[in-house]
Image (cartoon, rainbow, N blue to C red):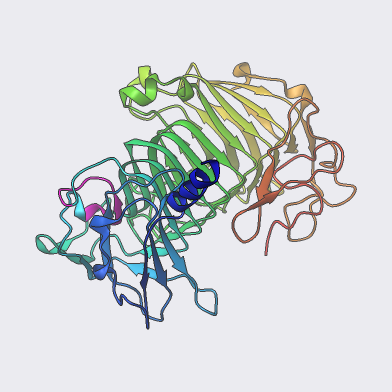
């Protein structure tokens, strides 16, 4: 009986249909995939081809932990992901869903299939682009323009949703996640070239969920002329770990949820930013790296508690003032430990502005650093300072003999993983006491 039960369980776990899309496959185009009838354990495998797939679809389906629903791209011989392009894309006629103009790929919110909260859905290995003005698509209402705030991927609602090894670009928002979502993970993805010229309201990522994790992603500059932030978030339980984030009005804009369930949840009290490489280009966007608190003027909803800012490497190329943290909530407290803050000769690194408090531990800051809001910054006596952090040439990892080596705080462990070039993570290995910053000695931090 036990053996029979085990065989039955194995069969259930492996259940599912695989739909193959691409040249020489059973299905040639995305509108031939039965998106409306996917079941737990099903997979859609999309093979790369020279021309993009011009299709768009909704995923309003539920997998399980043992049998997720997986939409997987297969790269070509040159390593190129299959491309789903929203420009002139066609929606499968059997689908009928609202907010069709808000995304190339949409998760949650449909009339056909019947509306459910999607669960255990994974998108892997795809490049998704072209969800923006002035592009059009062919949908339930005929030829339709994308909304100004359209996204490459729009998660209207869902739980246990994972994006892995995807590239989201050339859209209003690269990723947009609405507050009815929970437990969303973005891993090893590339987000760049999004936003709208002259607008500050669209971003490489704009997310609001109960449980939101970014790990091992490479965020690049926004679209030319766009004024948005790189990563803007209103989540409860936000974790930003081991990413590379370069450019944007701010690299991180972590503001109020403005939604009852999120702002009332215990996890809303802590925001975790650890092990990231944050790069500020010369004279680009705001001179603040991280904003934490709120921007709605509903001060009762501002992030009330702690920002854990640990083992990050912050590199500014701005010749004047660069402010590490803008803390707009008077209840906010940032613990800043194990970080490296590098500025050019003549640059002026500033720790904090705003009414929130900062507790400094052991960090390395470029010389001439200033606390900023001095009466709200404590622990400056723990900060190491100098002219040169001792990086390996063209890298952001310390060389032997660097003042960063073995200088990490003894009471604060570094994250277990670090960013791995060009995207993703690998185990972080500190020989002995932790080194300061996002990379231990010997790590490769650039290509």
Taking 346 as reference, is 151 left or right? left
Locate residue 184: give its quadrant. top left
Say if the magenta span includes residue 240: no
Where 33 sits versus 105, above or below? below
Taking 437 as reference, is 217 left or right? left
Query: Is residue 409 something one can see in this rendering?
Result: yes
Locate residue 299: give its quadrant. top left
**Residue 280: x percent and y percent?**
57, 49
- The extreme left residue here reads 141
**Residue 288: x percent and y percent?**
53, 39
- The extreme right residue here reads 401
Q: Nearer the viewer, residue 356 or 318?
A: 356
**Residue 151: x percent and y percent?**
32, 54
Say if the magenta span includes residue 105: yes
What residue lies at 28% left-to-right and 71% top-to-bottom? 54
Query: Is residue 251 something one can see in this rendering?
Result: no
- Quarter of the picture containing the C terminus is bottom right
Where 75 sits versus 62, above or below? below
Where 52 sits versus 193, above or below? below
Q: What stretch is highlighted in magenta?
A: 101-112
What residue lies at 55% left-to-right and 79% top-to-bottom? 78
Where 77 sits versus 318, above or below? below
What residue lies at 42% left-to-right and 73% top-to-bottom? 47
Q: Which of 293 and 387 is in front in this view?
A: 293
**Residue 180: x percent and y percent?**
31, 35
């Amino acid at each position: 009986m036990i053996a029979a039960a085990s065989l039955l369980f194995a069969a259930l776990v492996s259940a599912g249909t695989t739909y193959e899309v691409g040249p020489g496959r059973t299905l040639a185009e995305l509108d031939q995939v039965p998106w409306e009838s996917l079941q737990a354990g099903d997979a859609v495998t999309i093979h790369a081809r020279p021309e993009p797939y011009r299709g768009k679809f909704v995923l309003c389906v539920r997998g399980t932990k043992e049998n997720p629903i997986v939409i997987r791209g297969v790269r070509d011989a040159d390593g190129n992901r299959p491309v789903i392009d929203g420009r002139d894309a066609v929606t499968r006629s059997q689908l009928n869903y609202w907010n069709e103009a808000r995304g190339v790929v949409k998760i949650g919110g449909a009339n056909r299939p019947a509306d459910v909260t999607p669960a255990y859905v994974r998108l892997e290995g795809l490049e998704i682009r072209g969800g923006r003005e002035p592009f059009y698509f062919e949908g339930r209402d005929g030829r339709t323009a994308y909304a100004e705030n359209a996204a490459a991927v729009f998660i209207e609602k869902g739980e246990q949703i994972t994006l892995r090894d995807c590239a989201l670009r050339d859209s209003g928002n690269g990723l947009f996640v609405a507050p009815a979502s929970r437990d969303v993970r973005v891993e090893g993805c590339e987000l760049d070239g999004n936003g709208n010229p002259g607008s500050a309201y669209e971003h490489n990522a704009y997310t609001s969920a109960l449980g939101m994790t970014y790990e091992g992603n490479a965020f690049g500059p926004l679209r030319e002329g766009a004024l948005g932030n790189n990563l803007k978030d209103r989540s409860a339980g936000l974790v930003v770990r081991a990413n590379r984030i370069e450019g944007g009005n701010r690299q991180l804009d972590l503001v109020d949820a403005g939604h009852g369930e999120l702002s009332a949840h215990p996890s809303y009290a802590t925001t975790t930013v650890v092990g990231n490489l944050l790069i500020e280009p010369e004279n680009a966007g705001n001179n603040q790296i991280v904003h934490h608190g709120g921007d709605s003027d509903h001060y009762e909803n501002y992030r009330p508690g702690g920002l854990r800012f640990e083992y990050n490497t912050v590199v500014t190329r701005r010749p004047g003032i660069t402010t590490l943290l803008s803390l707009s909530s008077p209840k906010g407290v940032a613990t800043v430990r194990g970080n490296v803050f590098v500025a050019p000769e003549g640059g002026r690194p500033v720790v904090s502005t705003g009414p929130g408090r900062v507790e400094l531990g052991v960090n390395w800051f470029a010389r001439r650093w200033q606390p900023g809001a001095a009466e709200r910054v404590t622990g400056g006596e723990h900060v190491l300072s100098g002219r040169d952090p001792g990086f390996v040439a063209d890298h952001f990892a310390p060389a032997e003999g660097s003042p960063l080596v073995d200088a990490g705080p003894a009471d604060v462990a570094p994250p277990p993983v670090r960013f791995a070039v060009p995207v993703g993570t690998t185990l972080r290995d500190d020989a002995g006491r932790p080194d300061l910053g996002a990379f231990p000695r010997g790590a490769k931090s650039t290509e």
